[in-house]
Image (cartoon, rainbow, N blue to C red):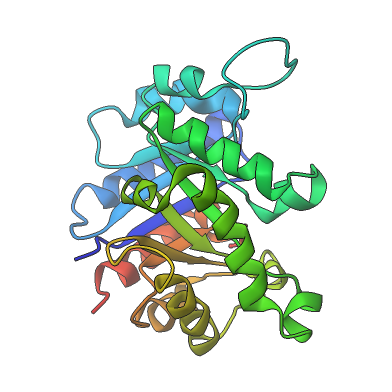
Amino acid sequence: MRTPLVAGNWKMHGNRAANRVLLEAVVRETETLGGVECVVCVPFPYLGEVAGQLAKTRLVWGAQNLSEHSHGAFTGEVSATMLAEFNCRYVIVGHSERRQHYGETDAVVAAKYAAVLAQGMKPILCVGETLVQRDAGQTEQVVARQLQVVLDLSGKKSLENAVLAYEPVWAIGSGRTATPEQAQAVHAFLRARVLRETCILYGGSVKPENAAALFAMQDVDGGLIGGASLVAGDFIAIARAAQHKG
Ligand code: PGA
C-alpha cells in the first residue's frame, strides 16, 4: 500500500510572521489527520525556524532545491549535508521552474537526486512536458527521458526512498489542471517504469475543488501543491481529499 502524500511547494513566498500563522493552522489540523503524510517545502532562510516550529508535530518539512555538489566554492548554493543537519526530510528536485529559469539539465537533476539520497533524505523528483511537447504527442517520450537519466545514475532501487511528481508544465500556476484521466494516463505510464510502491504525485493547479477527482485515480497517490499550499484551509482540504483516497 502506498501512503498518500500531499506536499506543499511554497516557492518564493512567505515571511516569518505569515509562515508562523500558516503553519499553526496547518499543524492544528494535521495532528488529527491520519492516513496521509503532509509536507511543506519552504524557502531556505526559513528552514531552521520551520524545523523548530514543526518539531514534535506530524507535519513534515522539506526544501525546494539544493546543490548537486557536496561542498566547495559554489557561492550562493546550499548542500545536502546542510539540509540534513536540520533534519530535512524531503527535497524537491527538477521542478520545471528550475529547469526553465535556471537551466537545470536532466544530468544536473540526476546529480541533485543522488545528492539528496546520499544524505538520507527523500527526493521529490518532478517530471513533466510543456504544452508544445504535449501538442506534438511527446509527453511520454519527455517524462520517460527525464526519469531515465535519473535512474541511469541512481538505479531503479533508489525509488524505494524517493517520490515522483508528474507536473505538466502547462498546468502549473495556470489554473488549468490536467483532467483526472490525463493525469492517470501519464501516471500509469510512469508506474510501469518505477516500483509498485513508488508514490507518484500529481502537481499543477491542484485545488480543493479538483483534488478528490484527481486523487480518485488509481495511480495518483497525492499532490504537489503550489498556490493552494499558501492557504491553510485549501491545503488541509486537499490533504483530506488524499486521506479519503480509495
Ligand atoms: P501550482 O504549482 O499548484 O501553483 O500550479 C504546483 C507546483 O509548481 O509544484
Image check: 161 left or right of 104?
left
User: In the depicted view, which residue is nearer to us: 52 or 162?
Assistant: 162
Furthest toward the top, the residue is 73
Residue 126: which quarter of the image? bottom right
Q: Is residue 27 above or below residue 55?
A: below
Residue 223, above or below 232 = below
On screen, residue 74 versus residue 155, left or right, reads right
- Quadrant in the picture for the C terminus: bottom left
Rendering quarter of residue 203:
bottom right
Residue 240 spot, x, y in % from top left: 30, 66
Ligand 1 is found in the corner quadrant, namely bottom right
Q: Quadrant of the N terminus?
A: bottom left
Q: Is residue 87 above or below residue 130?
A: above
Q: Residue at x 78, y 84 (%)?
A: 136
* Residue 88 coordinates in the image, percent (x, y): 40, 29
The number of numbered badges drawn on the structure is 0
Query: What residue is drawn where x is 67% and y is 69%?
Result: 142
Q: Position of residue 216 (x, y in %)?
A: 34, 82
Which residue is depicted at the point 44% across and 68% down?
Answer: 193
Measured as percent of width and height from the top left, residue 199 is found at: 35, 61
Is residue 176 visible in the rendered image? The answer is no
| Residue 39 appears in the figure | yes
- Tell whether 129 sits left or right of 206: right
- The residue lying furthest to the bottom in this view is 181
